[in-house]
Image (cartoon, rainbow, N blue to C red):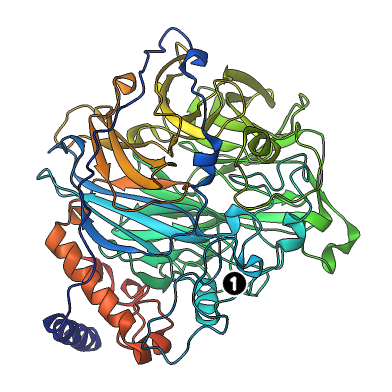
Amino acid sequence: MLFYAAVTALVLSQAEAFLTNVDTIGHKASPACRVEKFAATQDTSTDSSASDLSVDVDFKAYANGYKTVFAELPFAECTPTFGSIPNDLKGSYFRSGPAMFSAGSIAPPKTSIIQPREGPPVPDGQNPKRMVLHPFEGDGGLLGVTFPGDGTATARYRYVRTIAFTNERRKGQRLYRGMDSTREMGPAIGEGMGNDLHTPLFRHHLQPGLNKNRKNTSNTRAIYWGKRLLTMWEGGQPYKMDGLALSTEGRSQLGGVLKELDPFGSKMVIDPIKNRAIMYGVVQDSKRSEITLYEFNDKFRALAEGDSGKVRQEVPGLAMISDMGVTENYAAFIQPPVSAGMQFLLVKEPGKIAKLEKGAATLHLIPRLESKKQPKSFKISFDGAVEAEVQIINAYEEGDTVVLDAIRSDGSHKSGNQAAQWPWASSHDEYKQNAAKRSLWRYTADLKTGTVTKDLLSDQQCFFGNVSPSDNTQKHDNIFMAIGGMGTEIAPPQGIARFNVNSKTMDAWMPEAHEFCGEPMFAAKDGSSSPDDGYLLTVVFNGKTEQSDLLIFEAGDVSKGPVTRLPIGMGIPHGLYGCFTTGEEARWGFDEIQRRAKLSDKMESRGNLWNEVKSDFSGLGLRFDDMEEYFGDSFLS
């Protein structure tokens, strides 16, 4: 503890010294001068397909959402242009997504002795050598919006300073090209799912460990648990972020649970009954793969030390798994039928050696830690579309069955081997060629008979499904999801909906044709006695102005439209997955966020320090990621 006290004293004294001379940086969001006109909405409660809620989608406006963010947002006060911020909305919203499509587009500090060889950043498309070949290859950006509960909100947006990001930033070049050969094979590879526009089946190079082929962009999901904020990417370790400034503290081994080269998944499920978080990792091989389950208490500590705190399960074949559902006793995975050629030992590009077969997928039910159940694997009958890239929304047990609700993707309509070109979706035909048809399904596994049935809940084009956090691992009534603007036709995420799984009815809202919503996130109302009483938060991108707003809805009345519209102060590219935490420690005010953001920017602006600590904000030449591993829970207090 003496060492801990000394380190703490040094950090605080140095930080205060910085703050006394911090110049004013960052900015406040300028109030929008327009009054936004929302599209006319309809209550679709009598039409589960919401086919009458369609718009004439502006695909050029949508394609504008695949532009690089060239300037981060250190902090900004958000002033509503419509409605007011509810006082019972308390906590912080975080969302991840690809944001840099031209490598090295955030230059190092001018004071750095290392400057890019290729010169300063250039607009997207100007230098093809710097452009990624698929949006999923873009470096991750993280949005944070905090509501202290006093009617105010503070936004910030930063890139995750991964090792790969920092290397390309220094050189102004795209250095990681391991997935290029796969992306160049076009949209039809992997039964149309290998290079799918939003979340491709082939997400990373198959060479394990840390190397220049396997680029961890940390761009897929933001999670908050045990007072830690992490960004995730399938196949690599998470990155630990500072919740206030969104500065990067470094790769996290989760308190020593992960080894340096361990692969890790991009999904965390919180069990609200046991107050635990469940995560996973997959070691992939051509003949057999291994799934590892990790379970953490509310302080983000493994339930047991060493191997006794993990559950390992071998599964046959090359397991291309990127999602998980969790019940009271099981973790559920859907493994698509993928075969690997003999050259797997020598070649690791997934497009060259992995083949998605037209056949039955497998549902694996792996017992959770402390569960007395046995592992089970059941075949899912093939109905003409392969179960690949199935997004599991929620899972639960009911008697002798396990139920999974999921968004299923079908890319069988795609054809051709011509790689898509940036910005990937500037017309309806181009979007259809690169994106899958998505629909809402229910899978029911009978534990006695070993059979799996599947039922179509809604053929509405849908994305990013989730449930109220209190419903995780439990039977649920409602699913919140983004929906396409053309009914059942293939179209990008645009509106949002609440779907009732019992009545199969939909309560939905659609914005203007040039606006596009992302994942809707449930936020419980502070002080409410009902866990289902809350708000829905979603980021909407305006493809005409290229600006983004945060919309706030009453979760129980989506079709009424947003009650609040908050300009973020910048345009944020189409994102992926996020979270909302109601934790009291995550209700920071503007002044506190501003103070931390200024300190982070000041540290990065010092060129010699930036070179020393690799721009990961670990600070003052010391490494702080996972410091609580050494000092215990008091470090997080």
Seen in the picture, residue 427 relative to 317 is either above or below; the reply is above
Residue at 52%, 53% in the rendered image: 266
Residue reaching furthest top? 46
- Residue 625 at x, y percent in the picture: 37, 74
| Residue 317 in view here | yes
Query: Is residue 370 shown above or below 309?
Result: above
Residue at image position (46%, 49%) is 268
* Residue at the outermost right position: 342
Residue 431 point in image, percent of width and height: 63, 38
Rendered image quadrant of residue 379: top right
Q: Position of residue 179 (x, y in %)?
A: 70, 62
Pick the quarter of the image with the C terminus: bottom left
Q: Amino acid at mark 1?
A: Leu
Residue 17 relative to residue 186: left or right? left
Q: Secondary structure at mark 1?
A: loop
- Residue 372: in sight, yes or no? no
Residue under circle 1?
261
Which residue appears at 24% of the width and 61% of the height? 75
- Side of 386 relative to 562 (left or right): right
247 in relation to 568, above or below: below
